[in-house]
Image (cartoon, grey):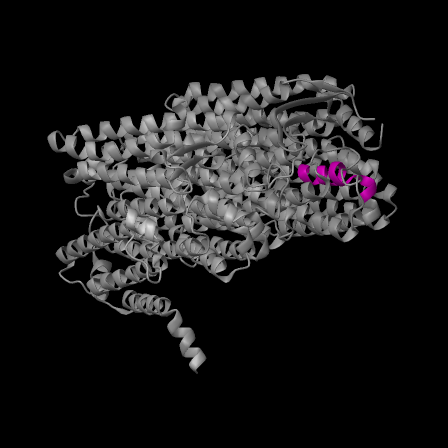
Amino acid sequence: MTEPVIESLKPAWALLCPALSSILILLSGRRPNLRETWTILASLIQFILVLSMAPWVTQGYRIESYLFKDILPQVHFGFRVDAFGLLFALTASFLWILVSLYSIGYMRALKEHAQTRYYFCFALAILGAMGVALSGNLVTLFVFYEILTISTYPLVAHEQSQEALFAGRKYLAYLLTSGVFLLAAIAWTYSLVRTTDFSPKGIFNSIPLLPSTLSILFVLFILGFMKAAYIPFHSWLPTAMVAPTPVSALLHAVAVVKAGVFGIVRIVCYVYGIDLLRQLGLGTLLSSFAAITMIGASLFAIAQDNLKRRLAYSTISQLSFIIFGVGLLTPMGITGAMIHIPFHGLMKITLFLCAGAILVASGKTEISEMAGIGRLMPLTMIAFTIGALGMCGAPPIAGFISKWYLSLGAIQSGYWAFLALILIASLLDVVYFYPIIRTAFFEKIPKNEVLEEKEPKVQLFSEPPPSLEREQPFFVFLIIPIGMTAILSILVCLFPNLFYIYPLVQRAIQNLSGG
Amino acid sequence: MVSLVEHLPLLIVVLSLLSAITILIAGWIHRRTAWFISLGTLIFQFISSFFILEHVLTRGPIRYRLGGWVPPWGIEYVMDALNSYVLIILLFLALICLLYSKKNIEHELPEKVVSFYTIYQLLITGLCGIIVTGDIFNMYVFIEIASLSAYALIASRGKIALRASFTYLVLGSIGACFFLLGIGFLYAITGSLNMHDLSLLLPPFYKNRVVIAAFAFILVGLSIKMALFPLHTWLPDAHAFAPSEISAMLSGIIIEVATYAFIRVAFSVFTPHFLRLFPILEILSWLAAIAILFGSVLAITQRNLKRMLAYSSVANMGYIILALGLSMSSTTSPWGGLNPALMHILNHALMKGCLFLVAGGFIYKADLWNIDQFYQLGKKMPYTCAAFVIAALSMIGVPPSVGFVSKLYIILASIEARQFFFVAVLLLSSLLNLIYFWRVIETMYMKTQGEEGHGPSSYSKHEIPMGMLIPIWILSSLCILMGIFWLAKIPMPILDRVNLLFGLFQKP
Amino acid sequence: MEWFLAKIFAKYNYWVFILLMLIGFYGIVAKDNLIKKILGLNIFQTAIFLYFISLGAVKGGTAPIVDEQIVQKGYLYANPLPHVLILTAIVVSVATTAVALSLVIRMYQEYGTIEESEIIEKSAREPLHGVNSKPET
């Protein structure tokens, strides 16, 4: 009934890359070049390993490797790669390469302190995210989920200012509390059905259980994945924006928050199973709940002047699109949700990387200060525009596809109100992204600024102002990842089969709907 | 033909006692020999404890008759799976603390090196004796030997430690007296002191009030020794102001050995059948739940690192007792029976041992006691602080550390016992653990300025000597490794044997 | 009343031991003077010793020195085992007292008093580190 299994240690090797590199990074702390070579090398190897698993999975195999059998009866510590897990693993490992490149430019340009710690924790965080993606059961997932939480704390509090420390504390308080809920839910699940393995059919079918028990357990699980930053437990994410931009980019647009959303999808589709949730009527509830966040976070976003905070609220809103899509419990909805994980990752990372580039080049963080920045940094702002348009769902950018499927899913579910909600939320995306683009491209550069910062011989407006992009020595490290993600967000819309994204999603849906 | 291994239980105790005397004499001649004699003895003891375990697992319990007197008249030493397991933990931690003490004691108590190691060996003698003996009065004597040496060792730092030690002495003596009184009641009823014999003679009297009173006195007496809430009041000061290796021993193993004594009396002398007659274990587990919360909350309020760790020990004793309390209502392998309790005895020894040794390192290098003085320590003493972080994460229960494993098992046990309140307590306590440990970690690594604005100002590395760092790192790496070993179920056969011994297990 | 008194006096040894135990306990808890505390502890321990010894007593029994006369004539003799045990326990108690007294002496050297409340007051003001502890430089 289930997919044929391939026993392979590749998932373990893929996890060994960041683990080993973290140690190497620590050892070569005094030689920055060597240290960063390790990061890049590990990310490349990891991506190749993960990518090499994709053909097997798209052909319908499942990859399993167990490190420790029977840590509890019927629970093995190990990995079990299915299409959905691989999708997230691909996203995280690919973006790690780009962000590692970007980090080099960013951290060196800003002369940040404690860079060894930064790269070390970064590698550990990737280890956590990859582990979450590849783990085959809830217990393994929990282990990596906690590693992810702990290892990102030093990144959030990197600046070590009062504000950063506060953010770090808040971050830990939220996420470890949620970890506690998750542990409780896992232990309860295990005591009920004696297994925690993910299965496309759900695992609660074996014995009859009270709907009330299942509902309470479901709430516990959702609380356990607070990393998904849904309202009202979202406020750690905007606070965590004090972190360096690459951290915000990879961790708070991809690894950490996506691990939360990933967990929710796992719970909905692979622990409860679509049929069971439909019987319990929890899917619609989940979607409605997510819809509050979709709309609410967008409204919050409009009010933010700090670019990164606005992006953070946008992330919160977009994450709820995924939860929303899964909650629809229709094949199209789930397709949309799954495909939004890599697509949103690509677009949001572009936006964050642009925000970081602006900070490096001009030192600006507030949107109101960015008048005319589009002329000073054209490449960056073009990439930003691509990302922003994609977020709004404009073709031919990645966001279009996911929103398309989500809308189809809403129609399939039969609730027309949900379709309306998607459209309203997308409209709100436009409302908060448009002012940034307008300010950047169409407002005039304040005169005094140009005079102060640039050499006085620059003539105002008689010739185009000098591009800030070309003056920074490390800017090439910044602009390459930005360009790649921006171009990719267009490419994946035109060719969804790139990096096996679409086939993987299709395979996952096939498995879920029973072959 | 009696194999050599069967003499080892006695040898472990006697050699340790002899080495105490030897240290005194040899140290009088030459001061430096003290540590080496102690080391030699402990290594011998540690290795022989493995032989004992191997023998017990393959050929069954060892019964050694002292002086050839036949029990129940003579004293008998009995080694089974339970005590050979605890013995290994004890000797391991003692060895680690001994390695650590070489530098630390020369620095802290330069005048008293010889007497320190003499009393240290006496402490080991007492603890080993508690573990190996099969005679309940003999156990009392060994408890007192261990306690008396502990009082002296705590007091060795002088000043405030004197008062802490005195409080411990008074309370500890009362506890020992209660224990003795309980033994007296048992003797009045049965006329026997041998544990095995008692367990055979007692069943007809289970409803007898004298027997119940005996159990109550023994329970209260040992509760003082194992610092079970609300009888823990002596613990924080005593653990905080003792020399650090002694703190590590006190928190890591001495109160656990008292717990072992209780397990021995409750399960070997009284048998689970007696425990089922009264809600003893239920009461214990509720007390333990209060201890967990109380200890954690008070730990948060402490400024002194070692006091904080001491309160954390109160909470961790709560874990062990809670697991003990659940041992009869959850019987499924692997989390049923005594497993989580015995597991946490080892795990706590590793974690708390490491934390106290690190705290000792801070005192050794910079005389830092209070958490708010620790800023920038992460840069100055990177290896020490890293070990601290690992052990602290382990206490918080981050997988795959030992703390996670014990927490998971206790949670599963309480779910099986249908005690969901305890699940909530355990989860809440790991959050409380997070609060008080994170405060330390944050100060060490993240804070750039202390609140009081003083303390060492240089940024240069200021690491403690290797002799202290290696023991710390052995413990902290074991915090992770042992967690993986537990998850891989490598030490499980020992625990299974213990549960079979007391009939607590149903094989799935 | 008579029945009650008979009940009390039939087991008077137990009453004595309980009374002594309570006196000792009172001393430990209520006295501020450390020496008096130790005295209380001693009384407490002695009470338990008395209990043990009275356990071994046999009405009309002689000392348990077994020679032929006793065995042949069928004399009763006291149970020696509790006495032996208590011999050990007394040694333990003496050791405890010795350690306690030496602690008190050390405290008197440090603080110049043996009143517990004053010691607490004085020790609260001192820096944390011990006598010999100096940071390594």
Residue A10: where, in percent of width, then height?
Answer: 63, 18
* Quarter of the figure with residue A341: top right
Along the line of sight, which residue is nearer the eye, B426 or A372?
Answer: B426
Q: Is residue B324 visible?
A: yes
* Quarter of the figure with residue A107: top left
Residue B453: where, in percent of width, then height?
Answer: 27, 49
Is A483 drawn above or below residue B157 in the view shown?
A: above
* Quarter of the figure with residue B117: top left
Quadrant for the N terminus of chain B in the image: top left
Question: Residue at the spot x=88%, y=46% of the render?
Answer: A414
Residue placed furthest toward the bottom: C1
Question: Residue at the spot x=65%, y=28% of the render?
Answer: A134
> Relative to B219, is B94 on the left or the right?
left
Which region shows up in magenta? A262-276
> Relative to A390, is A165 on the left or the right?
left
Please tell me whether the stretch drawn in magenta is mainly helix, strand or loop: helix
Q: Can residue A457 be seen in this view?
A: no
Magenta-drawn stretch contains A89: no
Magenta-drawn stretch contains A265: yes
